Image (cartoon, helix red, strand yellow):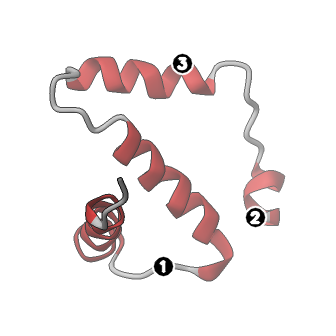
Amino acid sequence: MLHTNGIESVWAVLKRGFYGVYHSFNVKHLQRYLNEFTFRLNSGNVRVHTLDRIDALLGMCVGKRLTYAALVAG
């Protein structure tokens, strides 16, 4: 069974981030914004403690190297 509630919640998360956190999106970094909001939406279960979500986020960073050149290249 398909319904629109799923996409409605996605748009709600994006709008909250736009108005509440960033106030504008740079097209150059749009994929990074979407990745962040995807993470927020997928790990947003209120039964999961905030520190566990932070631990999951940091766990995904292990073994990744972010350099200034990578940030500039976008």
Q: In this view, does 49 lie above or below 10?
A: above
Mark 1 highlights which residue?
Answer: 25
Task: Say whether disc 3 or disc 1 marks the residue closer to the N-terminus.
Answer: 1
Task: Say whether disc 3 or disc 2 marks the residue closer to the N-terminus.
Answer: 3
Q: Where is residue 40 in the image (x, y as percent from the top left)?
A: 36, 45
Question: Does dot 3 land on a helix, a strand or a loop?
Answer: helix
Q: Which label number is shown at residue 74?
A: 2
Apparent side of residue 29 relative to residue 22 in the rendered image (left or right):
right
The residue type indicated by label 3 comes to Gly
Q: Which label number is shown at residue 59?
A: 3
Viewer-proximal residue among 2 and 55: 2
- Measure the alpha-carbon separation of dots 3 and 2: 22 Å
Q: Position of residue 1 (x, y in %)?
A: 35, 53
- Measure the alpha-carbon separation of dots 3 and 1: 26 Å
User: Badge 2 local density, few (<14 within 10 Å), some, or many (20+)?
Assistant: few
- Measure the alpha-carbon separation of dots 1 and 2: 14 Å
The residue under the point 16% across, 23% down is 47
Farthest residue toward the left? 47
